Amino acid sequence: MKESCQMLDPRELVQRTRRFDLIYKIALVDAWHRGEESAIHLATEAYLEQIRAAVDFHEEDNGKNTPADYISAIRELYESVKSGGYRQDGPPVPLDENGDLAGGAHRTAVCYVLGLPVPAIKIGSRRKPPTDRDFLARRHMHAAAIAFGDVMWKKYAPQSVCAGMAQCERLLRFPDWRDRSRSAWPRRLREHVLGGWQMFQSFLRCGDSKKRSRGRAAAHFRRASGYLRMADFLDELEN
C-alpha cells in the first residue's frame, strides 16, 4: 500500500532525527535569516567541512561537485521558500520506517528556520546516507567543526536525540569571565574562533607541512573548540 504524503512540523523531525549533519544546514540558514555576518562566516565554514567529510563535494544524483555548488543550492532553496513558501505539491521529504529523515535535510532545515510545515512521506527501508556523529568523526571531520555541531544541537534542539549524543558538556572555564563585559567578551571569543578557522584553512592549503606546523594547527583546533563552547554558553546567559 502506498503511503500518503503528510504535512509535518519540522521541529518534530529535528527532535527525533539521528542525522547529526542536519544541524549544519539549520545553523547556516538561520545565520542568513538573521543576517549576522560573523555567524554566517562560521556556519559556512562548518557546513562546508561537514559536506567535505560526508561526500567530498560530490553527489552524482544532483550535479553538485564544488563547495560553491553546495552554497548556491542551499541559498537558492532558502530564498525560494522564503519568498514563495514551500509548495505543497513539491517533492516530499522521504522518511524511513522509523520516521527519520532518509533525505531532504536541506529542505527540512529551511522549513525549520522559516517555521513552515514540510511535506513528508514514508518510503520504508531505503538505505540512508551515513551522517551520524561517529561517521563524520571517522571521516576525519575536523574537531572544531564537530564541536560546532555539538554546540548547535544544544542550542537549537537541546532535548533532541542528537543533542543527547553531543559531547560539549565540559565547557572551557575562564575563572574571571563573570568580571568581564558580557557584550564584549563573547565578541572577543568569536574573534579567536574565526582566527582559528583562518589558520585551519591555511593549514589545509599547505598540505603536508612540517610536524611543528601540524602540532600548532592541532592545538589551535582544540582552542577553537573550547572557544566555540564558551562563546555559546555566554550567549545563552545573555538571552
Image (spheres, rainbow, N blue to C red):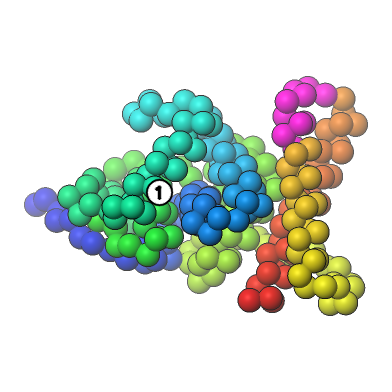
The image quarter containing residue 113 is bottom left
In the image, is 206 to the left or to the right of 236?
Answer: right
Q: Compared with residue 200, is residue 173 higher up or lower down, i.e. above or below? A: below
Instruction: Please tell me which residue is depicted at 55% across the width and 55% down the height of the picture.
Output: 35
| Residue 90 image point, x, y percent | 22, 47
Q: Which residues are magenta?
A: 200-209
Instruction: Please tell me which residue is depicted at 36% across the width and 57% down the height of the picture.
Output: 111
Q: Nearer the viewer, residue 86 or 1?
A: 86
In the image, is 111 to the left or to the right of 152?
Answer: left
> Residue flagged by tag 1: what amino acid is it?
Tyr
Q: Which residue is mark 1?
A: 78
Q: In what quadrant of the picture does the C terminus appear?
A: bottom right
In the image, is 180 to the left or to the right of 138?
Answer: right
Instruction: Please tell me which residue is depicted at 37% across the width and 65% down the height of the picture.
Output: 115
| Residue 60 image point, x, y percent | 38, 25
In the image, is 118 to the left or to the right of 147?
Answer: left
